[in-house]
Image (cartoon, rainbow, N blue to C red):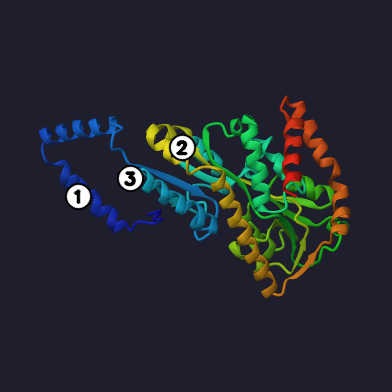
Amino acid sequence: MTKYSWKKIPIIAIATIFILVLVACGGGTEETEGSTEEASSEESSTSGEVIDLTVSSFMPGPHPQHKDVIEPFLERVEEATDGRVTGTMYPANALGESDAQYDLAVTGVADMSMTLHGYTPGEFPLSSVTELPFMGENAVDGTRIFWDLHEQFPEIAEEHEGTKIAWIFKNDAAQLFSVDNPINNWEDLEGMRIRTPSPAGTELLEAYGAIPVSMPMGDVYEAMQRGVVDGALGPASTITNFQLGDVMNYITKGDFYTSSLMVVINESTWNRISPEDQEVIEELMDREMALLAGETYDKDGDGGWTAAEEAGIEINELSDEEIEEWAKPLESISEEWVEEMEGNDLPGQAIYEAAVESRDQGE
């Protein structure tokens, strides 16, 4: 079974353990030396070693990506490896802040981590193609596009250096949330302070004349409540998962873009797993796993819309004609993205064309 960490251990328990250790250590030199040799022998042997994956996430404990995706995955891994590989979840930034989640996996502080690519700006330039405006209608559609690119271009995996990709996926489409003022057209965003999760969101907001304020989703509730920001760019799934329905009054529904996420495994940790167990785990980390994560986000988003309606939040759903108007200020973003990638000797044009082709095939 998937385990959760205990964040606090009573002081008396620590003292008791310490005393027991001292007593155990007084058993005599011969026994201690024998025990040391035995322990050393066990540590040097890979046979029978149980690897308990430390799994870090910025999302709150009961988030559907935990209970419906990662935890069942860990249970299947444990079953498929006959208990040789297990996992312990550390949600809600227990091991590090949101913007450190990828580095936790790279450095081995965590064996496995889930985070947004946008929380580590500049690290994943090619992966950001899927965050261009209107590149995917929902989480499943965006995930399909992202996985197609992952299979076609090894450069996508190479961006995740130091880790092994378990699965990459997209969340439900980003909308515009606001506290005091409705956003009926893009000109209404002029001068508004709007939270952004990533460089892609920043570019979109700047094109509309808004003032982007970069922050992780976990900080948005308080920022909106205290007036630090006037609104936020985020998916409907956050309305329930981060209780944002309590601090907003208006939503402009335009499905502007989808954020990309990853679940990655520390490379050294992966190499500790036997080739036989690697093989069975690989079979669980496939396209279907990524699509499951996308489906979970879309279901989560549906729940967010229901919660918004029940809370009396005013929803302005843009028509196709209105979206065409909203798209005009964003037209140069894709062109500039390609130019930037090519200027850095990256295959931006090829990946962009492949992304558009995959998107159009799904329509």
In the rendered image, which quarter contains the N terminus?
Answer: bottom left
Q: Estimate the spatial distance between the alpha carbons at disc 2 and disc 3, rounded to whole Å.
A: 24 Å
Q: Quadrant of residue 33?
A: top left
| Residue 321, position as x, y percentages in the image | 88, 58
Residue 308's disc is none
Would you say residue 215 is visible in this rendering?
no
Disc 3 marks which amino acid? Asp
Q: Which residue is mark 3?
A: 82
* Disc 1 residue crowd, few under 14, some 14–19, many 20+, Cα 10 Å: few
Looking at the picture, which amino acid does disc 1 mark?
Leu
Say what secondary structure mark 2 lies in.
loop
Q: Is residue 151 left or right of residue 201?
A: left
**348 and 19: which one is in front?**
348
Q: Between residues 191 and 196, which one lies in front from this camera angle?
A: 196
Q: Residue at x 49, y 53 (%)?
A: 91
N-terminal-most mark, 3 or 1: 1
Q: Residues within 10 Å of mark 3 (few under 14, many from 20)?
A: few
The residue singled out by tag 2 in the image is 108
Q: Residue at x 74, y 69 (%)?
A: 249
